[in-house]
Amino acid sequence: MTTNVGGIDRILRIAIGAALLLWFFIDQGTGFWHWAKLIGVVPLLTGLFSTCPLYSIIGMSTCPRKG
């Protein structure tokens, strides 16, 4: 896997993913919107691993260029 998630993008993904998961565990609601918060796993993992499959598909990268 190539790294294609840069600094600020990575920090935002981790923060948003963690916030959604924390909200899921704190709010013991029911229904669709409660379970929809589990989508926070996706930005959390893409931030932690610094790679985004969607970015790879569309050929995008937020990493600084080397050179």
Image: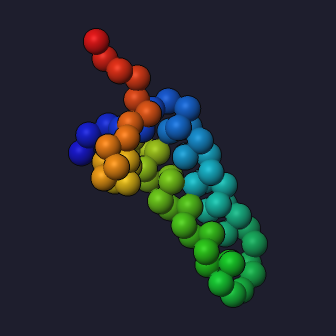
In front: 9, or 11? 9
Question: Which residue corresponds to the image point at 68% horizontal and 78% vertical from the top-left?
Answer: 34
The C terminus appears in which quarter of the rendering? top left
> In the rendered view, would you say 53 is above or below 36?
above
Question: Which residue corresponds to the image point at 61% horizontal and 74% vertical from the top-left?
Answer: 36
> In the rendered view, would you say 17 is above or below 36?
above
Quadrant in the picture for residue 38: bottom right
Q: Is residue 64 left or right of residue 30?
A: left
Question: Which residue corresponds to the image point at 75% horizontal and 81% vertical from the top-left?
Answer: 29
Q: Is residue 10 left or right of residue 32?
A: left
Residue that sits furthest to the top in the current view: 67
Q: Is residue 8 left or right of residue 24?
A: left
Q: Is residue 38 left or right of residue 56?
A: right
The N terminus appears in which quarter of the rendering? top left
Q: Where in the figure is residue 32, as x and y percent of width and height?
A: 65, 84
Q: Where in the figure is residue 14, as x and y percent of width and height?
A: 55, 46
Count up the numbered dots.
0
